[in-house]
Amino acid sequence: MSTQHSRSAAKLMIAPATFLLFVWMLIPLVMTIYYSFRRYRLLSPERQGWAGFDNYSNFINNPAFWSAMGNTLLLVGGVLIITIVLGVLFALLLDMPMYGQGIVRILVIAPFFVMPTVSALVWKNFFMNPVNGLFAFAAKALGMQPYDFLSQAPLASIIGIVSWQWLPFATLILLTAIQSLDSEQLEAAEMDGASPLSRFFYIKLPHLGRAITVVILIQTIFLLSVFAEILVTTNGGPGTASTNLTYLVYAKSLLSFDVGAGSAGGVIAIILANIVAIFLMRAIGKNLDS
């Protein structure tokens, strides 16, 4: 069988799955766009009507919108900084020969496989509970007043929880990149008298550039839609202190029962996510070509 026939057969076999995936993604998107232009509230579904761009205007002019946008950027930026810095440190540590290295790597990667809802519940009740949480117990043991993380620093607490979830992913990608580094370069630099810091900044860190770009790209796309951690821990509060764009869409659609405004917010979130994804894809393309 020729190469052209093999490719045609492969395309034919994956065509049904591709079509189903396309329909599965297209139908919700079309329905969201449709309802974003209609006046549709769940409490009065009989009062539907064409709203035009009123839903978009109402969503953007909502005082909580800009607060949610700022929280979204802070959440994404904070998690990226924490996971990349600690990911590099953990990757360097795990690359060193040690006893039980395989078990240590499994333990470091394990949090990534915990569901967001479960991890949020564990952090909320086991660690951050101001009455009987582990942090409160440690504060009392040191003679200090327990700190209510979720009430007094809600967004920082969520950044910490999400960073704990995504740190294993960044560590795994960066560890793979470090292990692909040619050891002869490090040995030559060491023989020339380069210090460990010099070897890190001039050899290892430039080598990690592409892996760091990949981590930023993938994590940013997922971090823009963080929802379960906020719902379980703070419900977007106090006020809108921990409300991001995704939670605001949920609040508009299912808490305020305004499907039209919620759908408009969903479309806005999709547009912003695609802008960020395109920007990062171009950045990573330039990085890979360089």
Image (cartoon, grey):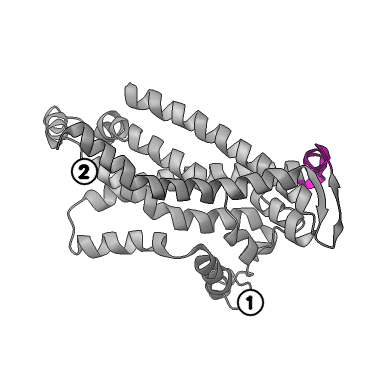
Determine the secondary structure under disc 2. helix
Q: Name the residue under label 1.
A: 131
Q: Which amino acid does label 1 sit on?
A: Val
**In the image, residue 125 lies at what x, y percent?**
57, 74
Percent position of residue 122, x then y: 52, 71
Amino acid type at mark 2: Gln
2 vs 1, front mark: 2
What number is the disc on residue 161? none
To which quarter of the image does residue 247 belong? bottom right
Image quarter of the C terminus: top left
Numbered marks: total:
2
The answer to whether residue 145 is visible is yes
Instruction: Report the span colored magenta.
Output: 51-64
**Considering only vertical position in the picture, is 178 above or below 240?**
above
Q: Can you give x and y, in whole percent of width and height, for residue 89 in the image?
A: 34, 47
Tell me if mark 2 has few (under 14), some (14-19) or many (20+) residues whose alpha carbon lies within 10 angstroms of its own. Answer: few
Point 51% across, 43% down: residue? 221
Q: In this view, does 202 lie to the left or right of 254?
A: left
Dominant secondary structure (helix, strand or loop) of the stretch shown in magenta? helix
**Quarter-wise, where is residue 4 in the image?**
top left
The residue at the point 42 percent across, 46 percent down is 18
Residue drawn at x 60%, y 56% as measured from the top left: 227
Q: Position of residue 92 (x, y in %)?
A: 28, 46
Does residue 69 appear left or right of residue 91 in this picture? right
Q: Nearer the viewer, residue 101 or 283?
A: 283
Q: Mark 2 points at which residue?
A: 179
